[in-house]
Amino acid sequence: MTRFAVRRLPRPLLAGALLLFASAAVAEPLVEMHKDPNCGCCTAWAEHLEAAGFEVAIHDTQDMRAVKLEHGLTPELASCHTATVEGYVIEGHVPAADIKRLLEEKPDVAGLAVPGMPHGTPGMETGRVDDYAVLSWRRDERTPAIFNEYTQ
């Protein structure tokens, strides 16, 4: 659209178009999260992602074991909730910044995991802060690698 054409748009239409363009430019991809319906820390993690710009679709399920098996998660990587975003698996309380880095760098990994439920991770803000690592893994190799570390 030429500069002349933009100036000739009615102001409400121009403002709406600019707002739509701006929100589309900064919106993060959809995260599909599976969790137990009674888990509050999972909901808090989803709120952390939403505050970082992600859209989160929450799917409550009573059979998290089946979800984890479907996504190729081993017990060593397991946490309370399992999510997917752009083909990657996100297991547990992974910080939004690490997910953004994953999506920018697009490494050849299956996903990211924070095994267990360490205190101080997003959604697990209990007043205590544990050291923890965000792990990545490849489907053809069962040994995870450290993607990022959080130490106090």
Image: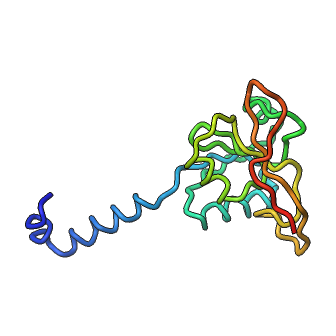
Image-quadrant location for residue 111 = top right
Question: Of residues 121 and 45, which is closer to you in this image?
Answer: 121
Residue at 74% x, 44% y is: 82
Residue 110: percent from the left, percent from the top? Answer: 69, 35
Residue at 55% x, 62% y is: 53
- Residue lying furthest top in this view? 140
Residue at 86% x, 57% y is: 132
Residue 86: percent from the left, percent from the top? Answer: 56, 41
Question: Of residues 144 and 124, which is closer to you in this image?
Answer: 144
Residue 103: percent from the left, percent from the top? Answer: 57, 47
In the visual, does 45 lie left or right of 130? left
Q: Could you tell me which quadrant the C terminus lies in? A: bottom right
Question: Of residues 122 and 32, which is closer to you in this image?
Answer: 122
Q: Could you tell me which quadrant the N terminus lies in? A: bottom left
Residue at 76% x, 36% y is: 137
When the figure is inspected, residue 15 is found, relative to residue 132, above or below; the finding is below
In the visual, does 22 lie left or right of 4? right
When the figure is inspected, residue 146 is found, relative to residue 4, above or below; the finding is above
When the figure is inspected, residue 26 is found, relative to residue 69, above or below; the finding is below
